[in-house]
Image (cartoon, coloured by chain):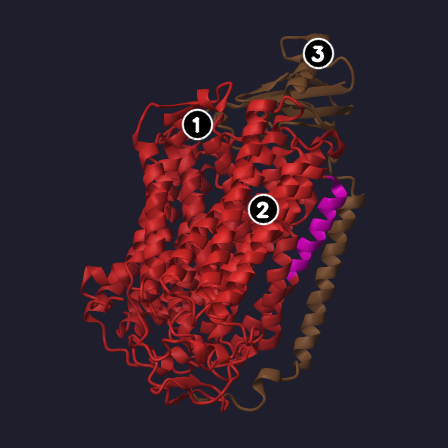
Chain colours: A brown, B red
Amino acid sequence: MPAPLDPPEGNWWDEPVNRRETIWLGIAGLWSVGIFGWMSGFTQFGDQNPIGETYDVEPDAYRERVQEYKDAAEETERGLVPPEDSVYVGAMRYNWDALPVVLEAGREYDVHLGAYDVQHGFSIRPEETLSKQINLQVFPGNEWVIPMTFDEPGTYHVICNEFCGQGHRSMHGTLVVEEA
Amino acid sequence: MSELPPTTSLRRWLVTTNHKDVGIMYTITALFFLIFGGVMALLIRLQLWEPGAQILSGLAYNEAVTAHGLVMVFWFLSPLGFGLANYFVPLQIGADDLAFPRLNAVSYWLYVLSGVMFAISFFQGGTLSAGWTMYAPLNVPMYTPSIGSTGAILALAMFVASTTASTVNFLTSIHHSRAEGMGLMDMPMFTWSMLATVWMMLFAFAALLSVAVILLSDRVFGSLYFSATEGGSLLWGHLFWFFGHPEVYIVFFPALGVMLELFQTFSGRRLVGRKWAIIAICLISVQSFLVWMHHMFLTTINLEIKTLMMATTIGISLPFDLLVFALIYTLIKGRIQFTTPFLFALGALLLFILGGITGVFLGAIVLDYEFRGTYWVVAHFHYVMFGGATALFGGIYYWFPKVTGKMYDEFLGKVHFVVFFIGFNAVYFSMFLGWETPRRVFEYDPAFQTFHQIGTIGAFVLGGSFFIMFYNLAKSYLYGEEAGANPWDYTRTAEWAIPSPPPLENWDGRPSYASGKLEFVQDAVADGGHADGHGESHLDEYPYWDKHPSHASIWPFAFSVATLIFMIGLSGVRDSVSLSLGETLATTALSMSNPVYPVFAAVGPILMVWTAVRWGTEDFYAPPTAIAERWPFHGIEKVKLGMWFFLASDVIVFGAFISAAVFIRVNAGWMNWGPITEPLPGLINTFVLLTSSFTVILALVFARRENAKGLLASLGATILLSFTFLGIKAWEWHHEVYDKGVTLTQNPHGDPIQASIYYVTTGLHGFHVVIGVLIAGYLFVRAARGYYREDQRPLEYFGLYWHFVDIVWIFLFPLFYLF
């Protein structure tokens, strides 16, 4: 081992790459490409993503649309029953407008998401396992239309998962999914 | 120039510009902010002891989370790395000091006073409560109205100003002052990773500066950027994360550098694949700017772009894999000494591997739907960032003998590591176990309570472990054994070749690697010439060549205090002053409810200009390194190189402003907007500015010919032309406001945000012109007193700045006046 001030032996700044190193680099590279291909493929073809489409909309105009939807929907004790396949949700400080809503299990709905004021987080969690979740960011000025199907009947909680102010912790709504 | 007082004097620490003193102050201040942010963290953990506990109110909890994030990322992690870098980068490259010692001192003072500003914000009606990402539009005053929220963002802007200064300083030092024979590839690994860090910082922090300035214009002047429904909310996300992702590596790379250094020293083995490790570091620096939208996978961005960002994100894990393999292989091939610093470096590697692998999951869009907003993310980034910082504590132990000359207590050091490592994993691994907890609320499923209670206990253990370190270092500093110049067996970097602690001037003789190993050469420079001609003619022209280097100046401190006064004033000015635009300029009224903030806001800039002028006229001499490796900037003088780096960051600042304007306009529909200004005044102003660029060049030519009248006339013409520009601008704004009714928030002819963009973007340019006028005025007075005949560099470098300001206008003119 050389002392601190001695130069290292030989042409140390330009040593050829060791063969084992090259092999490991190759394996790591292949592994990464494999993982990446799988991830990318799963995103494109795995049919796992609620992708949907986005539209520009003024927050006030969106609020009116939600109001029209609420007027058309049937009011029950458990919540609104949507008139057609479209379900509107309006995020506002500190409330989910048009929730609770009553949905049928197995039926595909177009869920419309939009915010009236600041950014909110639309996080759905089934009641039994408060764990499994899906989480979407809801922006003012955008209307995001996402096709969603609920397989299991039950109650799903919607909480806000982006900081939105003083009452953020109490911003809560429910989706009631019933057997068709 | 004043003499540097001894270390026992308080004045020493206020005036010092020496890189070693500043490094010590940086490190100690960063550790103070570790405690500050740590207290916030403990409050959060107490709140999570049981679901929905109410130790803090909902708003106070949000404030604690926000402050914890901001303090730890900005005021602790980066500055701790920079403390070590301040001390050891100049030593490792064989330089006498950083390139601009006073600029380094001002970096430190702006940093510590920005922290003070942040602390003050708690008492200004509550600090910011929008999370450390400060997502729009929650960050505008309509939703976060407290003065403290503005104060916190002003503190952040002040911090960014400090980092921009140190970025320019480090880039110039490393590219300008490396010892003879030390090529870029020969640099020690810690210096290498700092070089990559500052290159990333140059561009990333410029983006943060512009996004902070835009937000401040929303908060202080009331412009409409981030409340605009034409994409204002997404604009924040893009600009913030364009900074935010490189920032992850900016805080990690100093720690990586320490890790690389310590693995070599304590395995007694050269880093395996050294060249490839350096290539990987460079690749990561570039790639870090291409992945930011993976923080926005659940926004309304379309899937094609998200998939592209997923590809680049996975791509960035490749060079990291290489670095990890290089580190592991170095250990396999070496003989390991399990000292305290090595334990911390090894711990950092283990924690980082766990943090990195859990991050790969988050890089997949599909999994983000499930993971985002949960404690998985919280655990992941703590393992990466705090796990990385673990190596920095190793760095503190490693270099403690060099800084103090005393050896730390090895037993206490190992106890610290064990307690730290157990506490760390208790708090953060329990987050992985209870990962399904939602991240931004303090209510959670009682099933996870055990995990959170383990986490809370772990947090106190982790926090307590640092007091072992503080005790150890304090005790060792007072009573420790003498360490000698080099207590380690296999060090290879230059700082170990000089006494501990190093003398003020660092070297006895000039360090040189020209022969392939470190030697100290005695050059004869007493007669004003120097040993060999490197073709650096400007050094011969320098008139004060044989002066003694200066180490003390009070003006960095004074300037920073002035900045703090200005920032405090700005934070509350909107709440205490109201401006009503009447029908005409004559009826415009300004009413004031509380004079404190406006007085601060008025006094601050005056003091800033005064201290800056005193700074400029002070007789302070930082000698340029005569013989040095400078690739790839050979032949560029030191200050000019610094100027170019600064302008590069300013390009990004304006780039972000112009991108914001284009982004909002595209969202509003590009063709829906026409210019709200008349082209003719803008065209005249274009010619006025271009002419003023020409007169600056004339000034330089006259100065070279030693023609005093010509010099004064052309500088005077530049100032007059700038005033003409500002006059036309004032007329134009007056015309917009009183004839057309277009104000910062109102636009009778279209979207109000268009008016905001016009005023803010041209306003930023106008601000640059005002700064230019101030500098030109300073140069004019100095020129009248007979300066710049021999040394015309200030004129030339002012010219660089001025041409840049003009070029920016060439971009703004079509954007706001023609299309």
Give the total of numbered labels. 3
- Residue at image location 69% in from the left, 44% down from the top: B365
Mark 1 or 2, closer to the camera: 1
Type of amino acid at the residue the image marks with label 1: Pro
Mark 3 or 2, closer to the camera: 2
In the picture, the disc for residue B145 is 1
Quadrant assignment for the N terminus of chain B: bottom left
Question: Callout 1 environment at 10 Å: few (<14), some (14 to 19), or many (20+)?
Answer: some
Mark 1 or 3, closer to the camera: 1
In the rendered image, residue B294 lying in the magenta stretch gets the answer: no
Tell me the subunit letter for badge 3. A
Q: Are marks 3 and 2 on the same chain?
A: no
Which secondary structure class fits the magenta region best?
helix
Residues B66 and B270: in front is: B66
Give the residue number, with chain letter if any, for mark 3.
Answer: A68
Taking B764 as reference, is A4 above or below it?
A: below
Type of amino acid at the residue the image marks with label 2: Trp
Taking B676 as reference, is B761 above or below it?
A: below
**Highlighted magenta segment, given as a residue range:** B302-317
SS under mark 2: helix
